[in-house]
Amino acid sequence: MVRFSTLGATVLLASTVAAQIKKECGEGLGKCPSNKPCCSQYGQCGVGAYCLGGCDPGWSNKLESCMPAPQCQSKTYKFTDSKSSPIISNTKYLGDPSTADWVSDGQPLYANGVVYLTMAPETVGTVLASTRYVWYGKISATMRTSRGAGVVSAFIMMSDVKDEIDYEWVGVDLQTSQTNYYWNGIPDYTHSGNITLDGSTNTYSDWHTYTIDWTPDSITWSVDGQVGRVAKRGDTYNATTGNFEFPQTPSRVQLSLWPGGLATNGQGTIDWAGGLIQWDSDEIKKNGYYYAMVKDVTVECYNAPGAKGSGKTSYKFTDLNKVNTSVTLSNDRTWLKSFLATGEDQDKDLPKPETKTTTQISTDAAGKTTTVVNTIEPTESSVGTVPGLDGAGFDSGDLNRDDGSGTSGGSSGGSGTDGTDGPAVTEWSQSSTSGQSPGSDATRYILVWGNLVGMLVLGAVMVTL
Ligand SMILES: *[C@@H]1O[C@H](CO)[C@@H](O)[C@H](O)[C@H]1NC(C)=O
Ligand SMILES: *[C@@H]1O[C@H](CO)[C@@H](O)[C@H](O)[C@H]1NC(C)=O
Ligand SMILES: *[C@@H]1O[C@H](CO)[C@@H](O)[C@H](O)[C@H]1NC(C)=O
């Protein structure tokens, strides 16, 4: 049987990848302040990308701080090349789903017709999140997991108020797909269930299609079309509150690889993940990183029966009860003008580059004049605009820990060019979508994200922009 702490770990990092980044908002911490109003999926406050996917309306400054979420679109996402299902770094995405199908944090890379989710030593891995949300639907991912102690692969659905439906794989058990669901981020650890492959195959060596069929009444987990598990809404009723404690709010698809076995994680997480991660494993020696592979993702959208509103563009929270009736179908836009904008000030632009110049003219003895123009860059904002990853798992004990160690957050992936088993061709997705000049305003504001983790991310940002 699964121990409490073991599953406690699952919830929050199934809740996925967020670090030894100091949490600023959420249960026990309260809401974000008005100057950085948006509470990210991993509990940090900021503007810009903090107000997009994963922005939690419950812990943001106002209900309107988070942007409305792009509505579901049925589609099969293939990753044959960077154009088939575009992935954009979260340092570039501003909320318009026509610009990308996926937002990345970490280092995804395309090769061999699939996308590799990489985790290089001392990084917190990679997450892909769909730019569009699903409010009921059938979601399938054809993938191969990673392997090794402490290495966790995941395919989950996650809502902005932390309703969650999971598949997770720990790298020491390649036979088992762990399934789970949560409602409103409440750490009820009694809902996990395993689906086991027979001995002729495993999750690492072979492609399998994992499906989550999510309706208002049930969740069905299937592997290769065979039903492995069903959870029913009817079984989740809480008579005290009158709530069905069942996932019921619009959710993003998230695919990730993260280090459950980091020494800085809670012991429960480390045990659950199969022990400490080995950064000097054969896998790392050979390829430079751990990796999981995703061949395709298919989303078939269902309607939310009885949903309020008739808009076709976005899902919008209209109250904080965090249940199905809290969400309205709206036509409100989902994108921000800049990385300084928020849901409350969507058109806020970057300040004009008011570069101050001073001119010195000097004349030398020969009568030749030299003009020296000194440029003084404007002072920059210190408010974060792109939230970090939190690669650390934690059990309930470390939830509010203020760990300033900053060993992770943001990832600087390996070069990955000399792999034999790994991808032979590298094409960092971030570079492939880069159209900005290195000195763009967006870049600068990302670069000044003022904390240690931000500093570490800086390297990656500089490489990718
Ligand atoms: C599911 O499998 C994991 C990994 O093998 C194991 O640790 C856990 O106890 C199993 N959970 C259940 C509910 O059987
Ligand atoms: C029902 O909800 C109450 C209030 O949130 C909670 O304390 C209680 O544990 C819930 N009951 C069950 C069976 O989950
Ligand atoms: C919300 O869920 C309730 C059951 O809890 C259901 O009766 C109702 O139709 C649902 N409404 C929407 C908008 O999905």
Image (spheres, rainbow, N blue to C red):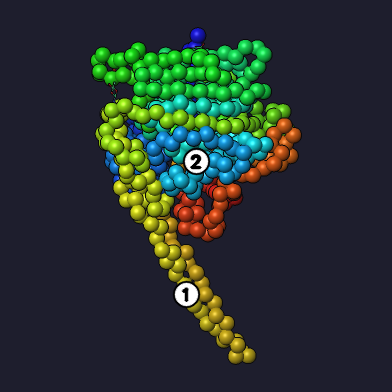
Q: Secondary structure at mark 2?
A: loop
Marks 2/1 in contact by CB < 8 Å: the verdict is no
The residue at label 1 has a CB less than 8 Å from ligand 3 = no
Rendered residue at 45%/39% (across/down): 131
When the figure is inspected, residue 35 is found, relative to residue 146, above or below; the finding is below
> 355 and 438: which one is in front?
438
Amino acid on which the number 1 mark rests in the picture: Thr
Rendered residue at 49%/35% (across/down): 75
Amino acid on which the number 2 mark rests in the picture: Asp
> 409 and 333: which one is in front?
333
Q: Which residue is mark 2?
A: 101
The residue at label 2 has a CB less than 8 Å from ligand 3 = no
> With 209 as the anchor, is 93 left or right in this view?
left
When the figure is inspected, residue 348 is found, relative to residue 136, above or below; the finding is below
Percent across and percent down for residue 394 are 47, 26
Give the number of callouts. 2
Rendered residue at 60%/26% (across/down): 145
> 165 and 21: which one is in front?
165
- The answer to whether one can see residue 251 in this image is no
Q: Nearer the viewer, mark 2 or mark 1?
A: 2
Task: Decide: few, some or many residues near mark 1? Use Cα within 10 Å; few <14, some 14-19, many ≥20.
Answer: few
Q: Which residue is mark 1?
A: 358
